[in-house]
Amino acid sequence: MLPENELLIESIPENHSMVMDFVDSQISDCPDDVKDQINIAVDEIYSNIVQYAYHPETGGVKIRITVTDVIILEFEDKGIPYNPLTEETPDINKPIEERPLGGLGVFMVKKLMDSVEYKRVGGKNLLILRKKL
Amino acid sequence: MIVTIMKESDVSIFLVEGKLDSSTSPKLQEKLMLALNEAKKIRMDFKDVEYISSAGLRVLLLGEKTARATGKSMTIYNVPDRVMSIFTMTGFADMLNIETK
């Protein structure tokens, strides 16, 4: 049995609502604006894992949420090594003709969270997001 | 997310409700691209949008690019502050036609 604050699921799009419901259940006492920010961050990270971590296969994703005076979100997968923090920062001042479709997810996560940390440990990607309450 | 569409001559009015994220945005994209084929103007009421992630922004950017390329227009109105802050953070506030109150 996993602890109540952990979820282990297969990295498929169909599990998206299960992930969001799990997150909602863990942060139900947090302010609405923080809930939105956490939801957006989780959507970005989970959809990245679904698309890239095991592509074209699927695999396990573990999500752990700890809420004290700071919310800590941990995402763990055994997929290909991928450090999202190395993604190029999009130029948000470019005119619309030069703006690509996409490339904003990780940028938004970094903006919305207080810190984002990546580790490759024992063949696993570990991404740790922190948001102060 | 729920999208309700009302048509008034050459205008399509979209009432968008709920969460615009990676699981719901493909549905909005499908309806928006269809409407951009049929209508001259798209007006999107964002009053009941809870939040928008990059997947939703992608659809809005695609919609705006398509509208410009085909001589049509897409306007978003009743944008809640929590959604507006995301538009501002990502530069979308300057790229999209956003009607302010």
Image (tube, coloured by chain):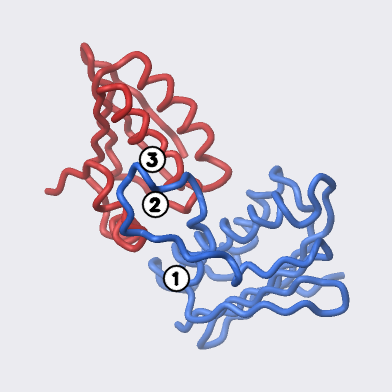
Give the distance between the C-alpha atoms of the residues marked 3 and 1, in whole angstroms.
Answer: 20 Å
Q: Depth-wise, is mark 1 or mark 2 nearer the camera?
A: 1
Q: Are marks 1 and 2 in contact (CB under 8 Å)?
A: no
- B78 horizontally vs B65: left or right: left
Which residue is situated farthest in the front direction here?
Answer: A98
Measuring 72% from the left and 66% from the top, which residue is drawn there?
A82
Is circle 3 on the same chain as circle 1?
A: no
| Residue located 32% across and 30% down the image | B14
Kindly identify which residue carries mark 2. Answer: B50
Q: Amino acid at mark 3?
A: Leu
Residue pointed to by mark 3: B60
Residue type marked 2 = Glu
Name which residue lies at 26% across and 53% down: B93
| Colour blue, chain | A
User: Is the residue under label 1 in contact with that under label 3 (CB below 8 Å)?
Assistant: no
In the structure shown, which secondary structural element does the residue marked by tag 3 occupy? helix
Question: To which chain does the residue with label 2 belong?
Answer: B
